[in-house]
């Protein structure tokens, strides 16, 4: 047993910082919450972005954080931070790892951060001081960034000068992105060997001299154009890889040789039945089997954690990264460890046993079963495509030039057979070939549709303006009256000019665009966009001719910003100045459907769990909210679920939701201490969301006092109870009616429902009734020849409509069936018509005297312009007539007419042409010498008939 097992290494770090007044903040899910710029959480600081940006709500525990520490689950397997290709080939790259982190949010700065880092490493972990090397930012004169002399001098108080090393911007200047917080950083490196001066090996990719801790000092903000300005408050962000630190504490040179990995390797050998353990072969570090052990172990950790946090394999984005990881692990296991397909999912328990005691959410039996089932499904799916994909790979090898597989073939393997490009590279390497990756990426890019750039964050003012407001002692906005549906009064405390980026003293009508100004009040009854609910709109009235139209409302760092502009008036302009007393007029007519949709969202969430989870025990996917949007037009709800929601379940969900609406359920709201609220049985909350303390609890149907008095009462599971700060109905019956109008897959394992309520729901029903009526009228009144076409048009109309989804599904099924029936009826009618035409043609042929007149021009109305029926008439005529006859048939339809011309071989051999006859009569025609046709207008039937007859004499003369 090692003196420093991984769990002790982690806990000592957390204990150290908790003793120094750091709040322990649990790891956020590796699937980012409300951050579309990230595939996965890849650093400990991700969940603290709003604190660095100054946009966190100061009324929450999160917004009040001054110091924090944790061990964050991280994945680096896509985008900028992509370690996938290196995993298994060295001793320290991983797709998944734990990042030990400590933070200061405008509290302490460099001196304490450096002092505590040195103290923890040398006094708690007792690392030899002579084997530790530290770096500081040397400056970047070309970009006007000074050296970090402050950090250097602090380090020199603790460390010999020869162990303090300057570093360039690449290694020692950290940036969140092209714009945003940034600053110099100071790294701590460890020499695994010791007894030497290893300063020259720092940051030289030497595996024996490795970085273990990075201290980032966020003191600047980079703005557009690259300009750096000091942040109003400086922050500290430190990160240290747990696995790497553990390898040092256990005296081994590889992360894989620690107790964090040993149980996984034992499980891998047991499941694959590989003859040798990892310990027996690990010294042969580059062997296929050694690499395979590492790949499989790393990837099962990554996938257990990511799937446990709600991610799902897919063909795009985050899901495709996970699918690549699964397939890479399966191929390494099968190809180099002799595993059988199905082995991979059996390793989940080993990961849960390793990580579960600290990350307890992984121990939930339902979560474990879901992870196993998803992995097993993916393994089976990959096995089916592997053999056919391998055939194409062999074809690609045969087509390769200069031992290089083309990017196009690599893309086909990726797109058609699901081979991640790194798998193709692996197979190519084994065949002594390479892949043209530049060509592959170019082909990939050309095949993708542009999805557009991620929208900019909805911040009307930034961290500098927030600090400016605080420096002026402007209090945070009191928005408690947003729950009172009445106009209120307030005072203007700040006016921001977005276009010019500054605060102004007054606002005049006619200045700027509709959303160029933001008014901040001492109190407001306007709801700011938050928690998936759209903002209120309305008016801020200072005087009869001084009205500010509120278009949007945002809460930025505790200041509620009312975005809009003043109405233009015909009278002399009246300004709205600072300190103006104003009346706040929320558009409550608009807020009512928003509230109806929001309260219905809570009840829908409850209905989904009741129908899909409790009534479908075989489903392995726990129904969890993944996102929502509430507007005045509709509600949109994303949730985890394995597979399409059936028509039967959609009906149950919608019926249950409307039953609840009819039950006259009172909606209760109250702020409750967070820990007390969390104990309420059946309460739903968003995984990974930050909630204030006290937290606003919304209960539909049961008083919150009852919930708090008896929180563990199982009866509470029969009610929709959630944490929520949004605006709601006073009684659910005000929602009146709810209708599901769409259900679709957002990604694998995540479904999306769109629901409308009140007038929108009534409108959906009315539109549905009209479409049903149109369907009935088409069947009753349309002829066989045109009914299928009319139904196809209606089918598209139904598909594009916003009628109840259950009705849409039924109606489309009926229409599809009627279209099939119409096609069958039309086909049967056409066959009957052809049979009738053949008989009529035969009868005409039997009685026709070819010797007297070898040319027949005939006008027929009983077959319309049906070409096949007219051709059947011709064939019947030819089969019965005695002698050779040239036919010119005119079929007269309801809208058009058609001419069919047929000449026997005896006539065409004399240079007669059916095409010429058609052109002589109609003016146009196409076909061959023996057969031609031409269409024309009904008005020309007589004229065509006469011209066809007139051409006969000339043709007779040619026989």
Image (cartoon, rainbow, N blue to C red):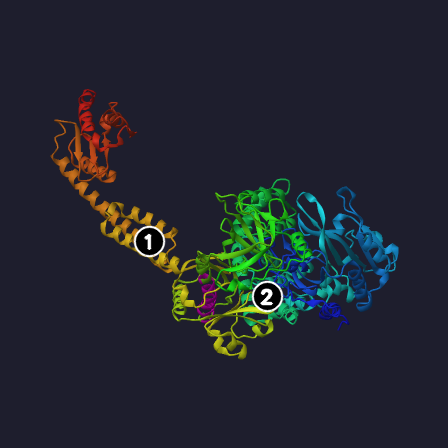
Q: Mark 2 vs mark 1: which is more N-terminal?
A: 2
Q: Position of residue 612 (x, y in %)?
A: 45, 67
Regarding mark 2 in the picture, which secondary structure is present there? loop
Q: The C terminus lies in which quarter of the figure? A: top left
| Residue 188 included in the magenta stretch of the image | no
The dot on residue 691 is 2
Magenta-tinted stretch: 596-614
Regarding mark 1 in the picture, which secondary structure is present there? helix
Q: Nearer the viewer, residue 914 or 5?
A: 5
Image position of 247 (left or right of 793): right
Q: CA distance from mark 2 to mark 1?
A: 49 Å
The number of numbered discs placed on residues in the rendered structure image is: 2
Q: Nearer the viewer, residue 600 or 137?
A: 600
> Residue at 35% of width from left, 50% of height from top?
797
Main SS, magenta region, reads: helix
Q: Does 958 sit above or below residue 610?
A: above
Q: Position of residue 642 (x, y in %)?
A: 49, 63
Q: The N terminus lies in which quarter of the figure? A: bottom right
| Residue 604 included in the magenta stretch of the image | yes
> Residue at 30% of width from left, 46% of height from top?
789
Q: Position of residue 142 (x, y in %)?
A: 77, 42
Callout in the foreground (2, 1): 2
The dot on residue 791 is none
> Residue at 60% of width from left, 51% of height from top?
495
Q: Can residue 454 be seen by looking at this rendering?
A: no
Residue ID for mark 1:
816
Q: Can residue 1 be seen by looking at this rendering?
A: yes
Within the image, what quadrant is residue 899 found in?
top left
């Amino acid at each position: 047993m090692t003196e420093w097992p991984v769990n002790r290494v982690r806990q000592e770090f957390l204990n150290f910082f908790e003793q120094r007044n750091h709040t322990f903040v649990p790891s956020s899910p590796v699937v980012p919450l409300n951050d579309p710029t990230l595939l996965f959480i890849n650093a400990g600081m991700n969940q603290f972005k709003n604190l660095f940006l100054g946009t966190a709500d100061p009324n929450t525990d999160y917004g009040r954080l001054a110091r924090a520490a944790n061990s964050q689950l991280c994945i680096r397997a896509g985008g900028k931070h992509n370690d996938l290709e290196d995993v298994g080939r060295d001793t320290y790259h991983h797709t998944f790892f734990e990042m030990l982190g400590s933070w200061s949010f405008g509290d302490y700065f460099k001196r304490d951060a450096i002092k505590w880092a040195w103290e923890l490493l040398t006094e708690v972990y007792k690392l030899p001081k002579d084997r530790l090397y530290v770096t500081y930012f040397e400056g970047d004169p070309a970009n006007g960034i000074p050296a970090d002399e402050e950090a250097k001098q602090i380090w020199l108080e603790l460390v010999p000068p020869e162990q303090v090393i300057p570093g360039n911007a690449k290694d020692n200047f950290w940036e969140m992105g092209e714009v945003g917080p940034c600053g110099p950083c100071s790294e701590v490196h460890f020499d695994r060997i010791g007894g030497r001066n290893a300063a020259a090996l720092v940051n030289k990719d030497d595996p024996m001299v490795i970085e273990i801790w990075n201290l980032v000092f966020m003191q600047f903000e980079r703005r557009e154009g690259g300009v750096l300005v000091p942040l109003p408050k400086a922050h500290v962000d430190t990160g240290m890889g747990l696995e790497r630190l553990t390898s040092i504490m256990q005296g081994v040179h590889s992360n894989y040789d620690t107790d964090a990995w040993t149980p996984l390797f034992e499980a891998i050998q047991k499941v694959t039945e590989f003859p040798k353990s990892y310990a027996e072969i690990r010294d042969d570090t580059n062997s296929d089997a050694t690499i395979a052990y590492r790949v499989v172990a790393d990837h099962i950790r990554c996938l257990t954690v990511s799937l446990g946090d709600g991610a799902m394999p897919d063909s795009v984005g985050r899901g495709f990264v996970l699918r690549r990881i699964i397939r890479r692990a399966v191929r390494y296991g099968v190809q180099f460890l002799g595993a059988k397909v199905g082995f991979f999912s059996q390793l989940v328990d080993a990961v849960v046993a390793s990580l579960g005691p600290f990350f307890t959410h992984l121990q939930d039996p339902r979560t474990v079963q879901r992870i196993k089932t998803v992995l097993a499904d993916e393994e089976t799916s990959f096995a089916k495509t592997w053999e056919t994909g391998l055939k194409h790979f062999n074809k690609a090898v045969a087509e390769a030039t200069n031992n290089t597989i083309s990017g196009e073939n690599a893309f086909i393997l990726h797109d058609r057979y699901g081979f991640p490009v790194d798998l193709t590279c692996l197979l190519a390497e084994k065949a002594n070939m390479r892949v043209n990756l530049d060509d592959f990426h170019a082909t990939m890019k050309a095949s993708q549709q542009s999805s557009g750039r991620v929208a900019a964050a909805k911040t009307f003012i930034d961290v500098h303006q927030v600090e400016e407001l605080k420096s002026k002692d402007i209090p945070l906005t009191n928005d408690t009256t947003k729950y009172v549906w009445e106009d209120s009064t307030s005072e203007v405390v700040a006016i921001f000019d977005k276009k010019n980026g500054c605060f102004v003293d007054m606002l005049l009508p006619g200045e700027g665009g509709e959303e160029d100004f933001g008014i901040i009040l001492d109190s407001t009854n306007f709801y700011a966009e938050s928690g998936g609910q759209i903002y209120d709109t309305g008016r801020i009235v200072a005087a009869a001719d001084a009205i500010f139209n509120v278009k949007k409302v945002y809460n930025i760092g505790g200041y509620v910003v009312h975005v809009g502009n003043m109405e233009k008036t015909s009278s002399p302009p009246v300004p709205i100045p600072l300190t103006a007393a104003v009346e706040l007029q929320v558009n409550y007519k608009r807020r009512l459907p928003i509230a109806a949709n929001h309260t219905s969202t809570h009840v829908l969430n409850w209905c989904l769990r009741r129908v899909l989870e409790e009534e479908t025990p075989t489903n392995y996917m726990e129904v969890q909210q993944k996102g929502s949007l509430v507007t005045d037009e509709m509600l949109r709800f994303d949730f985890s679920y394995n597979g399409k929601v059936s028509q039967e379940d959609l009906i149950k969900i919608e019926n249950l939701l409307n039953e609840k609406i009819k039950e006259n359920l009172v909606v209760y709201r109250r702020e409750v201490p967070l820990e007390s609220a969390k104990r309420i049985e059946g309460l739903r909350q968003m995984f990974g969301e930050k909630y204030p303390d006290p937290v606003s609890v919304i209960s539909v149907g049961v008083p919150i006092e009852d919930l708090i008095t008896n929180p563990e009462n199982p009866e509470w599971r029969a009610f929709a109870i959630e944490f929520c700060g949004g605006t709601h109905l006073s009684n659910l019956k005000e929602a009146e009616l709810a209708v599901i109008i769409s259900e679709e897959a957002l990604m694998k394992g995540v479904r999306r429902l769109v629901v409308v309520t009140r007038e929108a729901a009534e409108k959906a029903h009315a539109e549905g009734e009209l479409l049903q009526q149109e369907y009935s009228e088409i069947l009753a009144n349309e002829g066989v020849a045109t009914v299928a076409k009319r139904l196809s048009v209606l089918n598209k109309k139904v598909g594009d409509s916003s009628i109840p989804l259950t009705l849409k599904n039924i109606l489309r099924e009926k229409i599809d069936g009627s279209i099939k029936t119409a096609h069958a009826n039309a086909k049967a009618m056409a066959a009957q018509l052809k049979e009738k035409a053949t008989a009529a043609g035969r009868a005409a042929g039997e009685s026709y005297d070819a010797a007297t007149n070898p040319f027949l021009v005939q006008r027929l109305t009983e077959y319309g312009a049906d070409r096949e029926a007219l051709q059947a008439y011709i064939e019947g005529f030819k089969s019965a007539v005695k002698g050779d006859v040239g036919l010119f048939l005119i079929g007269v339809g309801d809208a058009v007419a058609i001419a069919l011309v047929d000449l026997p071989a005896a006539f065409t051999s004399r240079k007669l042409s059916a095409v010429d006859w058609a052109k002589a009569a109609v003016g146009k025609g196409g076909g061959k010498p023996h057969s031609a046709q031409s269409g024309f207008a009904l008005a020309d039937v007589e004229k065509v008939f006469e011209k066809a007859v007139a051409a006969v004499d000339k043709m007779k003369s040619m026989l």
